Structure formats: structure tokens, C-alpha cells
Image (cartoon, grey):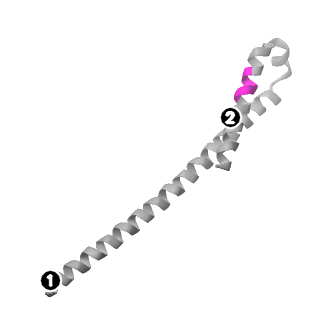
């Protein structure tokens, strides 16, 4: 075999190794980004829940007396809150 053919075969083998390494690195980047997105979604859900609880807990007394909410609207808001929190915690376990 000539030197050029040997060199060509070595370059092809090196390219194949580089391609496999690139695919492995790409898979690691994707896994890291999925973990980051899950964490951000969890933080967002917890923030939404905290804002809801803060709004309910710290509203002025006169606002409570002046405007009574219907039971249906209160139940709907509570269901949204519970659903958001449940989805966030469920995603965390996956």
C-alpha cells in the first residue's frame, strides 16, 4: 500500500472517531438542556403558586368585604393552582 492510501485510511478512521465523539457530546448537551428546562418549569410553577397564595393571603381586608367572589370562581382558581403544582411535581420525578 502506498503512503497516500495509508494516510487516507487514517484520516477516514479519525473522521469516524470525531463524528462519534460529536454525536456523544450533542447527546450530553441535549440531556443538560432538558434538565435545565424542567428546572425552569418547576420554578415557574412554584412562583405562580407563591404569587397566588400571596395574593390571597395578603389582600386588604376591605377588598374582601367589598367584593365577594363566587364559589365557582374560587374553586376554579384553586383547581388551576393545584393542577399547576401537580404538573410541576410530576415532571420533576420523570
Which numbered mark, 2 or 1, is in the foreground of this view? 1
Q: Is residue 77 magenta?
A: yes
Q: Secondary structure at mark 1?
A: helix
Query: Image quadrant of residue 63?
Result: top right
* Residue 58 visible, this orientation: no
> Measured along the vertical axis of the image, is residue 54 above or below residue 11?
above
Q: Position of residue 9 (x, y in %)?
A: 23, 78
Q: What residue is pinned by disc 2?
A: 84
Which is the main secondary structure of the residues drawn in magenta?
helix
What are the residue bounds of the magenta stretch? 76-80
Q: Which residue is denoted by mark 1 in the rendering? A: 4
Residue occupying image coordinates x 83% and y 18%: 64
Q: Residue furthest front?
A: 1
Residue drawn at 60 percent across, 47 percent down? 38
Q: Residue at x 72, y 35 (%)?
A: 49
Specify whether residue 42 is in view: yes
Q: Is residue 71 magenta?
A: no
14 vs 76, nearest the viewer: 14
Amino acid at each position: 500500500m502506498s503512503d497516500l492510501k495509508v494516510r487516507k485510511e487514517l484520516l477516514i478512521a479519525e473522521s469516524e472517531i470525531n463524528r462519534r465523539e460529536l454525536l456523544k457530546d450533542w447527546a450530553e448537551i441535549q440531556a443538560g438542556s432538558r434538565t435545565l428546562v424542567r428546572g425552569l418549569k418547576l420554578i415557574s410553577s412554584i412562583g405562580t403558586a407563591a404569587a397566588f397564595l400571596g395574593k390571597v393571603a395578603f389582600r386588604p381586608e376591605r377588598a374582601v368585604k367589598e367584593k365577594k367572589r363566587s364559589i365557582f370562581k374560587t374553586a376554579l382558581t384553586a383547581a388551576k393552582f393545584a393542577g399547576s403544582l401537580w404538573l410541576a411535581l410530576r415532571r420533576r420525578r420523570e
